[in-house]
Image: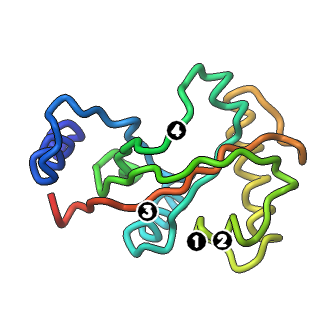
Amino acid sequence: MNIETYWQQFLTTMNLPKETKYFEAFYFGSDQQSAEHLLQLVLEGKKRATSSAEEEYFLTNEPEPKVGDYSIVTDFSGNPKCIIQTTEVLKLKFNDMTYDICRLEGEDLMLETWQEKHIEFFNTVGAIVGYQYHPDMMLVFEKFEMVSSERYC
């Protein structure tokens, strides 16, 4: 099913106005393995947040997420799998992250492993987009809830 058909079925199922727009359609992670793993965590209800470098939004001229936004989460191939809605957006420095916050991403059992994985992620994405990881970099931490999955649409 393509993204637009999926979105229209969601709007109909949820009785939302047809003109309602989604913020983005995307997959989590930077490669197929991470995308599939993180998607599964979302579908299981274990992943309820994500973090991005604030500088990425500036450099790509993309808007930052805001409370109430709907986004379509896809698999690595771009097939829609669920819809999430942003419930809260926090801004904090990378080195101010705490385990109580990052545990909502559902990926790690310790702050240290979250930091290691995210340093690698921000270095990878930063090399593409044009920023460099540093401990004082600002993060956009987005909390969300899954409001629909493919089995409901």
Q: Residue at x 58, y 71 (%)?
A: 106
Question: Label 3, on which residue?
Answer: 39
At label 3, which amino acid type do we have? Leu
Question: Label 2, on which residue?
Answer: 103
Say if mark 2 contacts mark 3, CB within 8 Å.
no
Say if mark 4 contacts mark 2, CB within 8 Å.
no
Label 1 vs label 4: CA separation? 20 Å
| Image location (x, y in percent) of residue 98 | 79, 66
Label 3 vs label 1: CA separation? 11 Å
User: Can you say which quadrant of the picture contains the C terminus?
Assistant: bottom left
Q: Give the numbered dot on residue 106.
A: 1
The crowding category of the residue bearing disc 4, from other C-alpha atoms within 10 Å (few below 14, some 14 to 19, many at least 20), is: many
| Image location (x, y in percent) of residue 38 | 50, 63
At label 1, which amino acid type do we have? Gly
Tag nearer the camera, 1 or 4: 4
44 above or below 85? below
Label 4 vs label 3: CA separation? 19 Å
Q: Give the numbered dot on residue 40.
A: none
The crowding category of the residue bearing disc 1, from other C-alpha atoms within 10 Å (few below 14, some 14 to 19, many at least 20), is: some
Q: Nearer the viewer, residue 38 or 50?
A: 50
The crowding category of the residue bearing disc 2, from other C-alpha atoms within 10 Å (few below 14, some 14 to 19, many at least 20), is: some
| Image location (x, y in percent) of residue 116 | 80, 62
153 above or below 125? below
Say if mark 1 contacts mark 2, CB within 8 Å.
yes
At label 2, which amino acid type do we have? Arg
21 above or below 93? above
Question: Label 4, on which residue?
Answer: 65
The crowding category of the residue bearing disc 3, from other C-alpha atoms within 10 Å (few below 14, some 14 to 19, many at least 20), is: many
Tag nearer the camera, 2 or 3: 2
Left of 52 or right of it: where is 6?
left
Among the two numbered marks 1 and 4 on one chain, the one whose residue lies closer to the N terminus: 4
